[in-house]
Image (cartoon, rainbow, N blue to C red):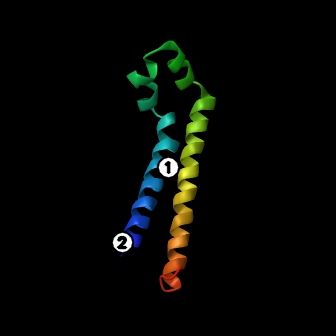
Amino acid sequence: MGAMAASLLFILYCIEAGIFFVVVPWTRFWALNPLLHSTDFIASLADNGFVRGLISGFGLIHLAIGFREIVSLFRRENRGGSE
């Protein structure tokens, strides 16, 4: 059961982080974050659409890994839990 719990926690992390990274760069929270506007250089990066897209792409990678792990977990369970 310990391996399954670890797998479920990893899946949960990937899905949550993926949603966060996909959504947040395009919200008002991102635009008004004082840490992202602490210097002119960081502010110019934060307001750049390419950087926002890059971070959203990072989120999509997390989502893909999470969904791949879900499929892998179901396949392991259907085979009786043996690897």
Quick one: label 1, few (<14), some, or many (20+) residues within 10 Å? many
> In the image shown, does 27 or 36 lie closer to the viewer?
36
Could one spot residue 47 in this view of the protein? no
Residue 34: image location, x then y, percent: 39, 21
Residue 36: image location, x then y, percent: 45, 23
Quick one: label 2, few (<14), some, or many (20+) residues within 10 Å? few
Q: What residue type is labelled 1?
A: Gly
The N terminus, quarter of image? bottom left
> In the image shown, does 68 or 50 lie closer to the viewer?
68
- Is 25 located above or below residue 2 in the figure? above
Q: Is residue 9 left or right of residue 76?
A: left
Could one spot residue 3 in this view of the protein? yes
- Is 59 located above or below residue 2 in the figure? above
Q: Which amino acid does label 2 sit on?
A: Gly
Residue 14: image location, x then y, percent: 47, 54
The residue that appears at 46% across and 26% down in the rendered structure is 31
* Label 2 sits on residue: 2
Residue 73 is marked as none
The residue that appears at 51% across and 59% down in the rendered structure is 66
- Element at label 1: helix
Residue 8: image location, x then y, percent: 41, 65
- Is 19 located above or below residue 65 in the figure? above
Q: In this view, does 73 lie to the left or right of 48?
A: left
- Is 40 located above or below residue 61 in the figure? above
